[in-house]
Amino acid sequence: MPELPEVETVMRGMQPSLEGKKLINIEARCDSLRWPIPNNFADRLKGRRVINIARRAKYILWYLDDETVMILHLGMSGRVSITAKRPSKIEKHDHLIFTTEEGAVIRFNDARRFGMVDLSTSGSISQHKLLRQIGPEPLSNDFNELSLKEMLRGKKTTIKNALLDQRVVAGLGNIYVCESLFRSNISPKRLALNVKGKRLKALSLNIREVLNEAILAGGSSLRDHAQTNGDIGYFQHNFMVYGREGQACKKNGCGNKVNRIIQSGRSTFYCTKCQN
């Protein structure tokens, strides 16, 4: 599933073609994705101008000129493609198609249909059922050592599972949690309430650092992720531990091999020597 850097990359790719532009045609080519497409979806968006496009956690938000906000989640395999004009062939899984006044065509393709779309308003978006319990954005001023300390207070789960909880930090997923913990020398098996002091400070800084590096690299292209122009991300070439089971730890002088364990049904990659 795309994580924060992949969603941020897609969101930024949308902005030049959509912000300030009027939507003159909307096609919903199916009745439902993960959940049903909202009633009168096309009619509510047609003729509206996109004022701003933003991201909240793993959701992309389109703010329109009538206070409507469209919420888009990429799901497991969702991709957004933007072309200067309508392609000669529409793909089988192009479920949502948006056309702007300048002729640009934005297609949401989702073979597995785990993505979703919904409509809200700018006045109530923060209380939407999908967004109201999400924690601070890790790239914002709301996220720092002190806020992370407060969110982890008293948590008896492992730090790996705590960071995957969207109520603790917004947008983190398996890849970037593994990478952040490695850079911070923290074992994924350590209890969250025991991550304190220098470890906590390092973790808060490394979460931000890893995410920013991944965004600059266009995200990590594992399976389905691609940018809106079709380019793939390449941060996967910078992985220190994720997906590297049995390979040598990249820290100088370590000599250990990357280990893999299962935590809450997900693979965790880490160095048993460097992380404690």
Image: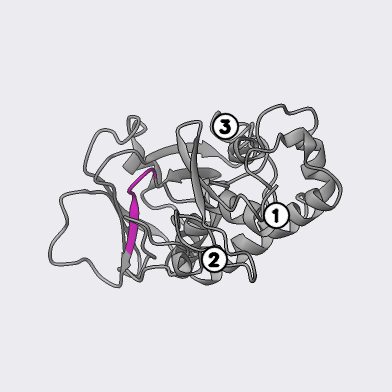
Q: Is residue 37 magenta?
A: no
Q: Is residue 75 above or below residue 251?
A: above
Residue at left offset 32%, top offset 62%: 81
Q: Which residue is mark 2?
A: 215
Part of the protein shown in magenta: 75-81
Q: Is residue 77 magenta?
A: yes
Q: Which residue is mark 3?
A: 128
Q: Amino acid at mark 2?
A: Ile
Label 2: how many Cα within 10 Å (few below 14, some 14–19, many 20+): many
Of 193 and 18, nearer the camera is 193
User: What is the CA distance from the residue labelled 3 to the residue labelled 1?
Assistant: 37 Å
Q: Residue 202 in the image: x percent, y percent?
A: 77, 56
Of 138 and 229, nearer the camera is 138
Q: Residue 66 in the image: x percent, y percent?
A: 52, 46
Indicate which disc residue 185 carries.
Answer: 1
Quarter of the rendering containing residue 104 = bottom left
Front of the two marks 3 and 2: 2
Q: Is residue 159 toward the left or the right of residue 94 in the image?
A: right
